[in-house]
Image (spheres, helix red, strand yellow):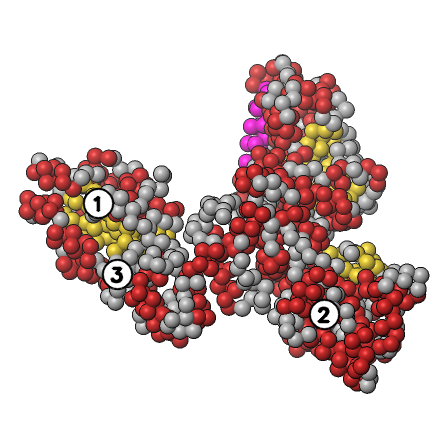
Amino acid sequence: MTENYKIRNPFADFNASLMDEDDILKYWTEPQVLFELQAIGVDLTGPNPVVLMGGRGTGKTMLLKYMSNEIQIKQFIKEDLNVEEFLQNIEYLAIYYRFDGPSLSSFSNRNVPEVAWNVIFEHYFELIIGQKYMLMLQNLKKNGCLEIAPTDEEKIVSRIFELFSESQMDRDNYNFTFLFEWLQNKQHEVDKFVNMAALRRNIEFQSEPIIPSGKLIFGIPKLLEESLSNFKHKNILIMLDEYENLTEYQQKIINTLIKHTKRPVSFRIGTRINGFITYDTLNEDEFLMEDADYRKILFEDILTSSKKEYKQLLKKITEKRLNEIPILERNGFTDIEKILESVTNEDEALQIVNKSSSKRHIQEMKNILKQKSAESMLPTLLYHENPLIEMLNLLLLRRGETPEKIKDMMKKYLESEKESEDYKKYKYLYEKNKLALLFQLVSSYRPQKKSYAGFDMFAMLSSGIIRNFLELCYQSFNLGLFFDRNRLLDEGEISLEHQTDGAVIRAEKFFETIERIPTYGNEIKSLVQRLGAIFYSWQMDPRLKEPEPTYFSVDTTSLSVEDRKILDAAVQWSVLQKKKPMKSRSPIMPRRDVYVLNRILAPKFSLSYRTRGRTSESEFSSKDIHILMCGSEDDANRVIRGLTGEKERHRDQMELWDYEGFENGD
Amino acid sequence: MMQSFINDGRDEQSIIMHHIMQCSQYIWENRIYGNNVGMWLDNFKGTFSSQDTEKKIALSLLSEFLYYNEKEIRYLCRNLYSLFKQKIIGGYLSQNPTAHLSDAEAYFNGYLTSCRFSDMGEPGESSGYILYTFRQENNLPLTLFRQKSDLPTAIKQKEVESLIVIDDFLGSGDTAVRFWDDDPSIQKLRGSDPTIDFYYLVLLAMEQGIRNVEDNTDFCVIPAQIFSGRYRVFSDKSIILPEDIRSVAKDICKGYGEILEDEIHALGYKNSQALIGMHHNIPNNTLPIIWSKNGWHPIFPRTTKVYRMDG
């Protein structure tokens, strides 16, 4: 019996923005898959700008912070390496800066002309990055990574001042600290002006000198390269996080810097999906072009397209956290895959049926056979060892197949007559539909519910968003520690029930946060709620035309500007995930964008955690989308009824074996 | 193993259980876990209503349990001291309406040197524990904290003008009244100097208890937090339980309470009907079904001794 002492949930902290340097180092796990993208032209540490795009919690901030010079030096020291060799050993030096939304939005109001704001922001950004450079140099010096004679330091600082023609002052004071403080004071002058501009009209910005765009950003690294041998051939990475917080004109300014980046400087931009408000630059006939000006990494795509690597990454991340809890570390319970108990579809089906005295799915089969006057065939269609086989037989009966044919097919399948056509068809149908059949089985045995448990399932539910996975673990651990701590601490397992409860809680919390999305929260929440109803209804379709529907497609060119913005916001906040557009059924039809409901929401609506299939039902019109997002309850119900009732009309045309489409996440 | 409380349709009971889990994790300092709740619920055998009803009522009561954790107790100690300070400064300013706040501050500092802080009970009781925390939180010098038995001598020497008794919980007020009437040190103090001020500083106080103390002693009661009659679990205006289940809940709690304690104290000391606990102890004014150990698995056991937070 485990003693009743307090145990910290190992997954309690998961927001990199709130982590200090030590926490970043402690929890850092290298996402190898992201560092191995050179083959497709993406080099995280190389000279070409890279845009790291991903939803909240995908690990962008963690990665950018980890690459910063502060953490890299700490890591070097932690590994007991000779700090004097730090600069020789590292390929790049990086500075990290996170854009703070509220302070950036104050860089615009009507009291100051737009053109003036442009200049002020360019100047401000130079000051910020200039300070970051100086902090980096101080940090290198302080930790013994950079030895520099005071006269050399004075010369460098003096040359930096010359970059923007500042008159030479008392040069005796010239060092990195002096320049940092000078830049800091200049920044305070800007801050003060920005605050005053909100209150006064016709206010003039009087701080001098105004630093032109790029002077420090590109000038300082070039000077360092020229003056310090250790800086030769080092990429200087400016890592800008939360790019989506910049206003349009601010993005244009930085887009221009990215477009015209000068070696050894390169940019790394961390942003949410759709975080670029504009790709324009300050030059009217130029804009940022993917591949030509930068490479893009879409976190969710990279992580989920390489499922094996993603799972390995999740395992490594969780292992570090589990090792932090002494009792788990002592007992060797640090493998999340083992801790999260899992169950096969077949076993789960069996458990559900065995818990109930009335066999409802068999009753249903009996009813259909009765209508066909073939009740005597019932025993031949039963297979108690696996209720999913029985569910498949029920499906085939509903689709109009004869009991005799079903019996033959099942027999061939169970007896593994692999050469037979019946075997192949039955096997295909079983493999394709078994999860959907399990969902249907569970729904007929209410109040029992489908479990969402196991490492693989949690990895799927996380939708390529690492924080989602950690949150699922956090909720499961909370419940496991409270309700069943002996099992967790003595046996290293969390039950299926508590994992499922954890997944439901996480889904609810995710759903609740949707309405807090700026501007379009309510519309997105309505859309999600209504999509949940539609997908659930399709999933329960007795003929199961669409086995696990969790997506819709729409021709976005037909949407109104406002509706498109809502969909973009839903993608930006990872409520929907955009997949590659579907090929149109006809060459003259437009390609339709595909939107998948974030799988983390699946437990809320009792939906499948996979995305499969392709049928016409999932094709929404622009009017449908508008009503589902902005329509009244009555209108939305009408659309939902239309979309889910549509299936009724297709029933008779449905072919037994017809299935073409995409699979994602099997 | 406990059943899944959330999976089966998120019914009312599962929501309450989840709430209790969150209370334990975020407020109750992880004092209880699911197995503790399970063992506690198993006490309810269906003697006074159906077992299911008894368990549901018990869970509802537990979800309303008002617990003051270590952080809150420390905060209350600081708050109590500032209330005391306000009282003294307020008195001074009403006597000296033209005085500056800095004068009042100086007056209070002088007044403080003539105060002595004391507990009410024996070492190891919760009043003594709170006295220690109170001193620690307000950075008060040890010299202001004397044994009660030393006080008469100090008063004789004109060192002391006020006695401030510190306590954690004022329920019926009987303990304070008894202390006032019977404690030999207090008797001596009252006899030796009739001008001496008596303050009773208490973290948590029930309304009827404050009245009792003020009516029957010369203590000036300063509570950090007052519980009105609405905090009595089964009172007509109770905010703890909804009206429709109050009567059946009372029957259940009274029934088990009589088995655990006696008829008079079945719903807490002298029918206090409190549902309150603190980091260091549970007052006996709280319903015995919560804390009693008489052949019962308490959910928050009441201890006879308390220990310092730091050790």
**Residue of label 1:** B122
Left or right: A94 as drawn, with respect to A417: left
Which secondary structure is most common in the magenta stretch? helix
The boundaries of the magenta stretch are: A174-188
**Residue of label 3:** B269
Q: Are marks 3 and 1 on the same chain?
A: yes
Residue A207 location (% of width, % of height): 58, 34
User: Is residue B142 placed above or below B14 in the rendered structure?
Assistant: above
Q: Marks 3/2: CA distance?
A: 56 Å
Label 3 close to label 1 by CB (< 8 Å): no
Left or right: A661 as drawn, with respect to B51: right
Q: Residue drawn at (49%, 61%), measured in percent from left and top?
A: B17
User: Is residue B57 placed above or below A293 in the rendered structure?
Assistant: below
Q: Marks 3/1: CA distance?
A: 20 Å
**Residue of label 2:** A440
Q: Nearer the viewer, residue A132 or A382?
A: A382
Let me know if residue A187 is in the magenta part. Answer: yes
Q: Are marks 2 and 1 on the same chain?
A: no
The residue type indicated by label 2 comes to Gln
Q: Are marks 3 and 2 on the same chain?
A: no
